[in-house]
């Protein structure tokens, strides 16, 4: 137990790396408070002894001292709770900040290794849980000190009685520890099924329209029912070991007390102890029982909350171990010349890109086309530095992309995805996440052609958008996403299927917008849209991870069978 809890303590404070005056005060006051509470049975035994001997004045003095002890104890308890509450609120904020910052560094594959339900649950329940770990560690340590003091009192009166009490406590501890270990084992399983249930509910909310359309609610319910059943089993087994420790294993201490009564009565009959000592030792045995129960309770709480600690650590470590690229070039004067030179890339040992080379020039629309799975999105992921190339090099303005500092790189390349995400806040607040200057926001919206629509809304730019902007059309959402991208002042814009599922009028607006945007940007576009293929300054046709051909629409349509088939399809 000691070795394990020391490790948990180290792991906790390696996560929460800040010194806190409230926590230090909590430790000091709590230790004093617990030691003072040991005087309570001592004063009670003296009161009984003095009353028995008709020494009433002395008894009154000890009653007053008992009252002062109670008062000091309650004030001390208030102070410890106040101090820990202040520590708790700071610890919660610190860990939540670390968790969220770690999520920002995740790669595209995180959901395959860390379930979304786990991330959601960890950001709430787990963070609240681990904030209590120091309290339990400290309380457990103090209870151990308290127990040693009690054993010392027993030893001072009788070594044999002290050894007997210690033996009973050790037997109880051994059985209780086994229950605690099993309790924690099934708690982990229970939490895993909670993650699966939460993740499934998140997917149900996201895909609600499809669920209703296909009538697959019953099948999803069956899957949830399986998770709930396994949760029930894990929960019951966890609770079984908990109440076994609290009841059946607790009989060891209770029958130990019965035997202690016999021992102390015999010692009293032989005149080897006084009635006050008899009462004191019985009271201290009860205190020892309370301490052992508290120690086991704190121990199981530490083990349970360490589950939360290591769940959070898994998420944060995943972010910490993600690909981090931060070069030494801080030059922000980027023109936007993009070059892939003999680039190859594998995913899970499967070749995706095979020795591709191409150039995307400033003031041009470079369009990448090809069948699904040919590597189009992988090109964007590599440009966004989500992965590192297997071989070959990628250049921007003739400099390796991995040599640029993170801030410079991210400020000069932006992406608008097919399924871009808009937050549940006002239009202005969504734009302000990139640039809070209202004048530049309006200029960006005018440039993409959405300003007039925004001004037609009752609240204009202060209109609150629902989560993922479901209260505006898909075309308006894409135009808003383009305006947001323009606010980044990026020289290179990556546009991934931005016209997918849009009506022809909105598509035409975006095509017209490209003519304007390319005057001061490098535009690289992934599309299946024929109209976008026609207006591209340069087409790159991918086939099975290789570049099949490059050129303009008219010449490729005339000379290349694969492009012709792709276009006609």
Image (cartoon, rainbow, N blue to C red):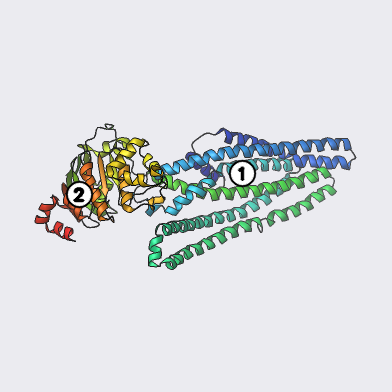
Left or right: residue 33 compared with residue 546: right
Judging by the rendered image, the residue that carries numbered circle 1 is: 140
- Quadrant position of the C terminus in the picture: bottom left
Q: Earlier in the sequence, mark 2 or mark 1?
A: 1
Q: State which quadrant residue 138 falls in.
A: top right
Q: State which quadrant residue 484 falls in.
A: top left
- What residue appears at the point 59 percent right and 39 percent down from the top-left corner? 84
> Can you give x and y, in whole percent of width and height, for residue 34 in the image?
68, 39
> Can you give x and y, in whole percent of width and height, for residue 311 in the image?
47, 49
In the foreground, 164 or 454: 454
Q: Residues within 10 Å of mark 1 (few under 14, many from 20)?
A: many
- What residue appears at the point 25 percent right and 38 percent down from the top-left corner? 491
Left or right: residue 161 compared with residue 231: right
> Can you give x and y, in whole percent of width and height, for residue 556 in the image?
12, 53
In the foreground, 88 or 536: 536
Whether residue 304 can be seen here: yes
Left or right: residue 339 compared with residue 26: left
In the foreground, 263 or 454: 454
In what element is the residue under mark 1?
helix
Distance of mark 2 from mark 1, alpha carbons? 65 Å
**Residue 51 higher or lower than 550, as above or below:** above
- What residue appears at the point 81 percent right and 36 percent down from the top-left corner? 64
């Amino acid at each position: 137990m000691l070795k394990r809890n020391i490790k948990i303590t180290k792991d906790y404070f390696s996560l929460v790396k800040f010194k806190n005056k409230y926590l230090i005060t909590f430790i000091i006051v709590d230790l004093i408070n617990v030691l003072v509470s040991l005087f309570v049975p001592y004063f009670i035994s003296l009161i009984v002894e003095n009353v028995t001997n008709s020494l009433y004045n002395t008894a009154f003095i000890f009653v007053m001292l008992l009252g002062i002890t109670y008062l000091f104890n309650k004030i001390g308890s208030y102070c410890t709770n106040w101090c820990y509450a202040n520590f708790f609120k700071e610890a919660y904020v610190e860990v939540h900040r670390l968790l969220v910052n770690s999520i920002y560094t995740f790669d595209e594959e995180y959901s395959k290794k860390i379930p979304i339900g786990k991330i959601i649950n960890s950001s709430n329940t787990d963070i609240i849980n681990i904030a209590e770990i120091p309290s339990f560690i400290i309380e457990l340590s103090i209870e151990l000190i308290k127990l040693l003091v009690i054993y010392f009192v027993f030893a001072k009166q009788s070594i044999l009685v002290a050894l007997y009490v210690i033996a009973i406590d050790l037997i109880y501890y051994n059985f209780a520890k086994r229950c605690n270990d099993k309790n924690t084992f099934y708690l982990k399983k229970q939490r895993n099924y909670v993650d699966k249930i939460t993740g499934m509910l998140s997917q149900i909310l996201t895909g609600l329209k499809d669920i209703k359309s296909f009538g697959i609610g019953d099948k999803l319910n069956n899957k949830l029912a399986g998770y709930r059943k396994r949760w029930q089993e894990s929960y019951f087994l966890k609770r079984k070991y908990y109440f076994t420790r609290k009841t059946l294993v607790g009989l060891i201490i209770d029958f130990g007390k019965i035997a202690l009564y016999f021992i102390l009565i015999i010692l009293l009959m032989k005149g080897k102890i006084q009635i006050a000592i008899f009462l004191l030792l019985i009271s201290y045995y009860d205190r020892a029982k309370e301490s052992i129960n508290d120690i086991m309770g704190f121990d199981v709480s530490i083990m349970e909350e360490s589950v939360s600690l290591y769940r959070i650590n898994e998420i944060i470590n995943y972010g910490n171990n993600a690909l981090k690229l931060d070069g030494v070039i801080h030059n922000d004067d980027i023109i936007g010349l993009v070059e892939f030179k003999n680039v190859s890339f594998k995913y899970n040992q499967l070749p995706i890109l095979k020795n591709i080379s191409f150039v995307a020039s400033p003031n041009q629309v470079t369009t990448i086309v090809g069948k699904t799975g040919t590597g189009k999105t992988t090109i964007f992921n590599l440009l966004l530095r989500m992965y590192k190339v297997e071989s070959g090099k990628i250049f921007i303005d003739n400099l390796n992309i991995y040599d640029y500092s993170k801030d410079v790189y991210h400020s000069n390349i932006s992406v608008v995805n097919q399924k871009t995400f808009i937050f549940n806040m006002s239009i202005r607040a969504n734009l302000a996440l990139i640039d809070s200057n209202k004048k530049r926001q309006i200029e960006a919206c005018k440039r993409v052609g959405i300003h007039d629509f925004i001004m037609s809304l009752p609240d204009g730019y202060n209109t609150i958008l629902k989560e993922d902007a479901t209260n505006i059309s898909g075309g308006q959402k894409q135009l808003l996403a383009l305006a947001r991208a323009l606010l980044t002042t990026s020289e290179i814009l990556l546009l991934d299927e931005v016209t997918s599922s849009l009506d022809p009028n909105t598509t035409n607006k975006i095509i017209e917008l490209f003519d304007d945007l390319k005057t001061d940007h490098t535009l690289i576009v992934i599309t299946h849209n024929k109209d976008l293929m026609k207006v591209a300054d340069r087409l790159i046709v991918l086939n099975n991870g290789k570049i099949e051909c490059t050129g303009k629409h008219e010449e490729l349509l005339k000379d290349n069978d694969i492009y012709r088939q792709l276009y006609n399809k």
